[in-house]
Image (tube, rainbow, N blue to C red):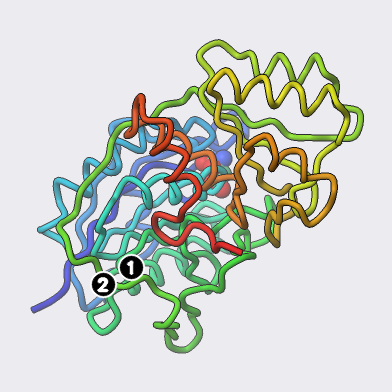
Amino acid sequence: MQNKVLIIYTGGTIGMVQGKDGSLHPFALKGIFEAVPQLELCDYTIDSCQLDNIIDSSNMTPRVWVDIAGIIEREYDNYDGFVVLHGTDTMAYTASALSFMLENLGKPVVLTGSQLPVGVLRSDGRENIVCALEIASCKEVVIPEVCVFFENRLYRGNRSTKVSAENFDAFKSYNYPSLAKAGITITYKKHLILPPPDKPLKVHKLFDEHIAVLKLFPGISKELVDSILHTPHLKAAIIEAYGSGNALTEKWFIDSLQDAIERGILLMDVTQCKAGAVKLRQYEASCDMERIGVISGHDITIEAAVTKMMHVLGICTNAPDTVRYMMENPICGEFSKN
Ligand code: ASP
């Protein structure tokens, strides 16, 4: 029997056309199929659907993640895999969010998009769609993960990050190798893929958006730090620190963090570096943060940190110890502990 794949179209450059003013805006799914006649040749069945509102992914919200996850939940038993066509700008956020929402995922969910609209002659979209579909429909290697496919590589979704607004290889996964590479054939690295689940799919749809990202820079002021940490209803903040998780050691800064922690705000240290991990206590410049109770994000991406924080706060209301435990431990391969 032929495998079946469902394409979920959300918007993004891949399906955009140029408006009268020259700017790109999202267009209907039909145009994408017309631009990729190769899809007729596939030896698997392709169905498609689109969100009610097709968006530039800069307008992505947790509400839309719930819509996408809801489609996958509803159609889970009807398809062998899913391809989500998505704008590149927030694709890594959506891939990360879906990885946390789709607990016990046993089928591939592959996000892809393109740097040039699929109707443009030199578009990277056709290749990306065809490869994403081949991976999502593969009978021999079933990837039970949310992934991002871009320019020949399949990445774990919650490890991926957009690195270029210009090049076709717009995504990278610096802290975890790619799961597959598309050349003449698609080569899977089976030892890097998560094991299949032993429980049925469970879809989590709650997010708590009361979080903040505090990006450090030389010269950052106490007023700015305090205003972020005193955001009304704030429950957690991700500190984007330097290098291996280092920050200024000035007393006012540590006092502000400690005050936030005492007010019940969870603080997590991630690195501004694209590659490598937070190693608290490696330098004196991170010892105080560890001492006062800032937790390590290890080698998590900022996209995975933000979405996981909102997810964990959403599902563990009024359980700060559980929130802390879940943030300190990987859920679905989003970081490696050092
Ligand atoms: N602004 C577009 C989006 O993210 C960019 C893209 O798709 O490449 O929807």
Quadrant in the rendering for residue 19: top right
On screen, residue 21 versus residue 16, left or right, reads right
> Where is residue 82 shown, x and y percent of the image?
28, 59
> Where is residue 95 shown, x and y percent of the image?
43, 51
Is residue 16 in sight in this rendering? yes
> Where is residue 318 shown, x and y percent of the image?
36, 24
Whether pointer 1 and pointer 2 mark residues with C-beta atoms closer than 8 Å, the reply is yes
Q: Nearer the viewer, residue 229 or 328?
A: 328
Check disc 1: other Cα within 10 Å, few if <14, some if 14-19, many if 20+.
Answer: many
Q: Amino acid at mark 2?
A: Ser
Q: Amino acid at mark 1?
A: Leu
Is residue 13 in sight in this rendering? no
On screen, residue 65 versus residue 113, left or right, reads left
Q: Is mark 1 within 8 Å of ligand 1?
A: no
Q: Which residue is mark 1?
A: 133
Quadrant in the rendering for residue 138: bottom left
Q: Which residue is mark 2?
A: 137
Q: Where is 118 relative to 194, above or below?
A: above
Residue at 48% x, 37% y is 309
For ligand 1, the image quadrant comes to: top right
Q: Residue furthest right?
A: 219
Q: Where is 76 relative to 192, above or below?
A: above
> Which image quarter is the N terminus in?
bottom left
Residue at 54% x, 63% y is 336
Q: Residue furthest left?
A: 1
Q: Where is 228 relative to 290, above or below?
A: above
Q: Where is 199 relative to 304, above or below?
A: below
Under tag 2, what secondary structure? helix
On screen, residue 313 versus residue 42, left or right, reads right
